Amino acid sequence: GGPRKHALLAQFERDPAVWSPAISKKAFGEGCPPTVPGFALVLSPAVPGEAVRSRRRAEAVAGDVLDSIGWSDAQRDAFGGLCAKMRPENRRVLGCVLANLRAARTMLGLVGDCHEETPRECGGVATPTPPEDASVAGRRRRPALIVEDNVRVVAVDAAARCEAAFLDADAPDLLYLGHLAHDDTLRAMAAASSSSGIVRLASPPADARPGSGVNHELWGTYAYRPSRRLYEALLEALRTDFPRLLLKEKRRDVEVTPADKLWQRVARRRFGVSQPTILCAAPPVFYRMPPVLPSKIHRKYDVGYMRATTHQLGLHGLTWDDVWLTPDERRRVHDDDDDDDSGGGGTPLAGDDVTPPPPPPPGTATAPLSAD
């Protein structure tokens, strides 16, 4: 709701009964850019994580998601007990996980109908629409992806690039149209990009450790598409590895594994490293928005994410001027550029080469990335 929803509508909504350029100007000012053509937006209800304090309250706000996971009655009781012990910030991470599972189920057609004739019934995804002369089969089933409310899309040819990524990706288990990562991963992906715009992300070595320079997990779930078999494998893992996969109990808190880590880790563990299970668009089609609206989960990293994204854009020869932004967001990134030019760069973050990473363990690969 509020400005986050309004920005999504201003980017993607084409139905004048729902949104219009006049509303965009009223919401964001005269400089608000026009709607990006080629997408159909459908909204999936969020899960208010801070409300997930017990089994009863979890079932009230996300009962459909819990039903799809298929936990037993005893597991649901244990889940409710762990929710009661969580700090509020971890409940917000849990809400994000449950919301992503709801959107994935919707996107895969397990709820509603993602046919072109009834585009508003498929729920919670921004979907590139097929061209007018597409085949009947192409019109009947649109490609679709999940986007979060913190996403900003490239301003030119976004839908065409999404379509090309879906065609070139050869049915991966996890396709990223937007992502962030450690600086070495971002550099490797930019170096490996090809004319197809798809980069293959292999599994890190089994003995990789955080900070070793070989952890290539991606950050964020703001623009991606999981496969049906990955979705089903994740639900099975949540049942069989309960609660350890999702929840880790500490002395006075319960930590939650974020959605981005869940998808990637289950993909690698279940389907191995021999298959191209995780693919990425390079350059990305979607980017994390500048922090005019603060994050609901990772507010302390807002500036860091923006500067990492600025670095990511630069690796692909792009700038924020190539991305759909509200007028306030555009002023924010230009003000940050002015601060950097004047020497007030602030905290070093991903994208700032402060110190080189330590060498990897003997026998490990340092860049498990290749152009498809």
Image (tube, helix red, strand yellow):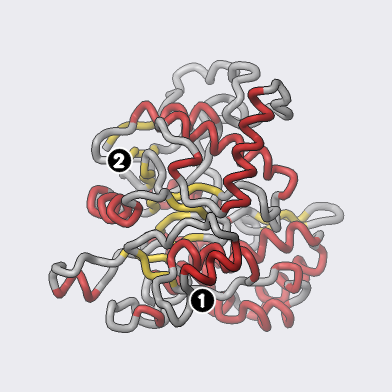
Q: x, y percentage for residue 225? A: 40, 58
Q: Is residue 87 above or below residue 5?
A: above
Circle 1 or circle 2, nearest the eye: 2
Residue at position x 45%, y 48% in the image? 178
Q: Which residue lies furthest to the front in this view?
A: 30
Q: In this view, does 2 lie to the left or right of 280?
A: right
Tag 1: amino acid:
Ser
Q: In this view, does 254 lie above or below 134?
A: above
**Mark 1 or mark 2: which comes first in sequence?**
1
Q: In this view, does 135 lie to the left or right of 127?
A: left
| In front of the other: 131 or 215 | 131
Tag 2: amino acid:
Gly
Q: x, y percentage for residue 307? A: 61, 35
Residue at position x 65%, y 30% in the image? 338
Q: What element carries label 2?
A: loop
Q: x, y percentage for residue 60? A: 68, 83
Q: Residue furthest right?
A: 252
Label 2 sits on residue: 197
Q: x, y percentage for residue 335? A: 65, 37
Residue 304 numbered tag: none
Residue at position x 52%, y 41% in the image? 180
Q: Is mark 1 on a helix, strand or loop?
A: helix
Q: In this view, does 41 lie above or below 372?
A: below
Q: In which quarter of the image is the C terminus?
A: top left
Residue at position x 55%, y 48% in the image? 288
Characterize the local packing of mark 1: few (<14), some (14-19) or many (20 or more) Cα atoms within 10 angstroms: some
Label 1 sits on residue: 68
